[in-house]
Image (spheres, grey):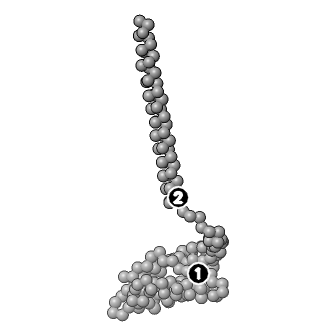
Amino acid sequence: MAAAPKTAPDAAAPAAPAAGGGKKKLFILVGAIVAALAVGGGAAWFLLAKKAPPPEAEKPAAEAPKAKRAAAYIPFEPLVVNLRDENVERMMQIAFSFEAADPKAADLVKQHSPAIRNRLILLLTSKTSMDLAGREGKEKLAAEIVQEARAAMGATKEAPVIEAVHFSSLIVQ
């Protein structure tokens, strides 16, 4: 029986190195996977990351918001007028807002609202439906509305109160 105990430790001895070799392989495999993920993640970050703009490009972008002031939008009452089309009765309904650089311009627009409304009715009733056709016709109309409103308020080119017109509705029937 003395011989039997010797064979049992010999059988266990070869199993221990095999288990140690398996742990080394597992450690190497996990290390390789971690390294592959790190390389892949670094490559993805490098390829997908936006390049930082040069310092010269940052300065104009930082100054741009300072140069532009907050706009004030002043809604104006909708107008309904007859157009000057021949042989056909056409009407136009228009709703818009004025854009001004100064929020105080709203008070001026309200103060001069009757004069602005009068000038705009005279302007709009002189138009035909063909004058308003297409984008160019509407852009020209917007510029004319700005001009008439400025004239009604006594604004000058050096100090315009109203800068633009933005249509919210323009219907011709």
Which residue is at the far front? 3
Q: Give residue 160's position: percent from left, percent from top.
A: 63, 83
Residue at 42 percent of width and 19 percent of height:
11
Residue nearest the viewer, comparing 9 with 143: 9
Disc 2: which residue: 46
Tell me which label, 1 or 2, sits earlier in the chain: 2
Q: Horizontally, is 77 left or right of 162 in the view?
A: left
Residue drawn 46% across the image and 36% down it: 25
Callout 2 amino acid: Phe
Residue for badge 1? 163
Q: Give the percent coordinates (x, y) of residue 51.
A: 56, 64
Tell me the residue at 57%/73% (across/down). Answer: 73
Disc sitting over residue 99 in the figure:
none
Which residue is more in the foreground, 24 or 1? 1
Whether residue 107 is visible, yes or no, is: no
Most distant residue in the top direction: 1
139 sits left or right of 85 in the view = right
Across and down, in percent, residue 6 comes to 44, 13
Question: Judging from the image, what secondary structure is the residue with disc 2 in?
Answer: helix
Q: Quadrant of residue 18?
A: top left
